[in-house]
Structure formats: structure tokens, C-alpha cells
Amino acid sequence: MRYPFAAIRGFVRRHRLHRAMPVDLAVIHDLYDVEYLRMPEELLGFAFATKKTQVVKVNERLHRFGQRMVLAHEISHLLLGHPNALYLCEVGDWWYSRIEVEAQKGAAILLIPEKPLVEMARRGYSVREMQDFFEVPGELIELGLRMANRIV
């Protein structure tokens, strides 16, 4: 079986996303049709692909850290080639299916380089300090830490 996150790790390497912290998402805005819209609170964002474009919409009501996580989550769906044509991200929804869990892990890979995360944890930084450093919600820091403790 192919390593499931190879496409995401390749994207990170190709675009040198982990060269500075927090991860600069400008390349994603350049490559994808990204838009921030006012959406109902329970809808965090969505993505879809057509033959001509790949579109990502993020709820502008989210805190900036949440917007970054949702953007990376939706891009992960596209990079992983998940089988649906439309990916909806709703509050509390991303732990209920394999593809949502994979997309959330992909978001952690995109936004949180493992070496600095592990080093900060080793030095005793709190989740709050790490989330401010990486500019992501604490839940993504916690997922990144769990992933760093085992092979994903």
C-alpha cells in the first residue's frame, strides 16, 4: 500500500512550506481558488474539484488560526484525492469518517513541522505556546503531538 500522506509531504517539500514559522500559506492561495465567505457557524469550509479548477471556501467568521486549519484540511482532501467531489467541513464532523481523519492529519502535516513541534514539547512548551507559534488551534497541536509519537 502507498504511504497515504506522500502527496502532502511532497507538496510541503516542493513548495518549501516548512522553511519558516508559521507556515506561509501564500502558495496555496496562488495555486487554488481560495475564498473566505460568511457562512453559518456550523459550516467551517468546503472544497470541490472540477476539471478546470480546485475551489476552497473557508468561513470568514473563524478565528485566523481556525481559518488556517480549515484551509489546510480542505487542501488535504484535494491533495489526497479523496473520492467525493464536494468536501464539507462542519463543526465536530472531522472525526467521524476515515477521509475526514486523513484530511485533519494532512492539515497537521501541512501546518506543523514535526521537528520543531517535538523539540518544543521536549523543552516543556505548553500547547497554548505552541499554538501561538504555529498559528493553529490547540486541537491541531495535540493531533500533531499524537502523530509524532507513532508512524502515521
Image (cartoon, rainbow, N blue to C red):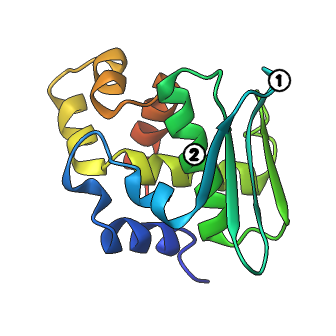
Q: Earlier in the sequence, mark 1 or mark 2?
A: 1
Residue occupying image coordinates x 35% and y 16%: 128
The amino acid marked with disc number 1 is Pro
Q: Is residue 149 above or below residue 80?
A: above
138 horizontally vs 99: left or right: left
Q: Residues within 10 Å of mark 2 (few under 14, many from 20)?
A: many
- Residue 25 pos. (x, y %): 40, 50
Q: Secondary structure at mark 2?
A: helix
> Is residue 149 visible to us here?
no
Q: Residues within 10 Å of mark 1 (few under 14, many from 20)?
A: few
131 horizontally vs 58: left or right: left
- Residue pushed farthest left? 123
Whole-number angstrom distance, CA of label 1 to CA of label 2 = 17 Å
- Mark 1 near mark 2, Cβ–Cβ under 8 Å? no
Residue occupying image coordinates x 43% and y 53%: 110
- Residue 130 pos. (x, y %): 30, 26
Instruction: Provide the residue designation for mark 2.
Output: 71
> Is residue 27 visible to us here?
yes
Instruction: Provide the residue designation for mark 1.
Output: 40
49 horizontally vs 84: left or right: left
Residue occupying image coordinates x 69% and y 45%: 57
Question: 115 or 81: which is nearer to us?
Answer: 81
Q: Is residue 25 above or below residue 93?
A: below
Question: 149 or 96: which is nearer to us?
Answer: 96
Quarter that holds the N terminus: bottom right
- Residue 31 pos. (x, y %): 51, 66
How many numbered discs, if any?
2
Classify residue 99 by image quadrant: bottom right
The amino acid marked with disc number 2 is Leu
Classify residue 89 by image quadrant: top right
